[in-house]
Image (cartoon, helix red, strand yellow):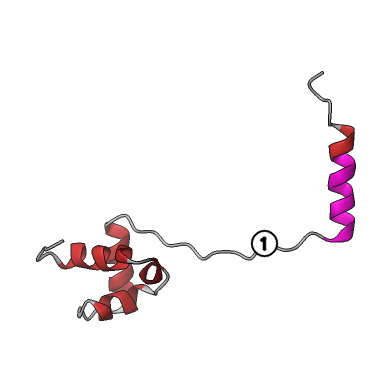
Amino acid sequence: MVTDDPCSRLIARATARSQNRRLPYIQVAELEGIHLGCRAARTVFESEGDHRKVARIKPFLSANSKEGRSEWGRRFHDWSS
């Protein structure tokens, strides 16, 4: 995609590869050769509809939680009949 608009260039670079989607905004801007501060980079991306979220780590189920889920499943197995 060829464009002169810096905002479009930043979005195109950020979405070109899955690796780029995980980079901080400022690093995407540096890859594109655009020098921005952190806040300015975030503002540009958010104005283009790119709102990043931090992935949370899902905790493993404890033995007690597993047993509770199994018991609940057995109790409500035939809830529709």
Image coordinates of residue 60 in percent, x first then y, are 75, 63
Q: Nearer the viewer, residue 14 or 16?
A: 16
Q: Using the rendered view, name the quadrant where residue 58 is placed.
A: bottom right
Q: Which residues are magenta?
A: 62-72
Q: Nearer the viewer, residue 41 or 8?
A: 8
The answer to if 1 sits in the magenta stretch is no
- Crowd band around label 1 with a 10 angstrom C-alpha radius: few (<14), some (14–19), many (20+): few
Q: How many marks?
A: 1
Image coordinates of residue 17 in percent, x first then y, are 34, 67
Q: Nearer the viewer, residue 19 or 53?
A: 19
Q: Is residue 15 left or right of residue 3?
A: right
Q: Is residue 69 in sight in this rendering?
A: yes
Q: Main secondary structure of the magenta part?
A: helix
Q: Quadrant of the N terminus?
A: bottom left
Q: In the orientation shown, which residue stands out farthest toward the left?
A: 4
Looking at numbered disc 1 in the image, what kind of residue is underneath it? Lys
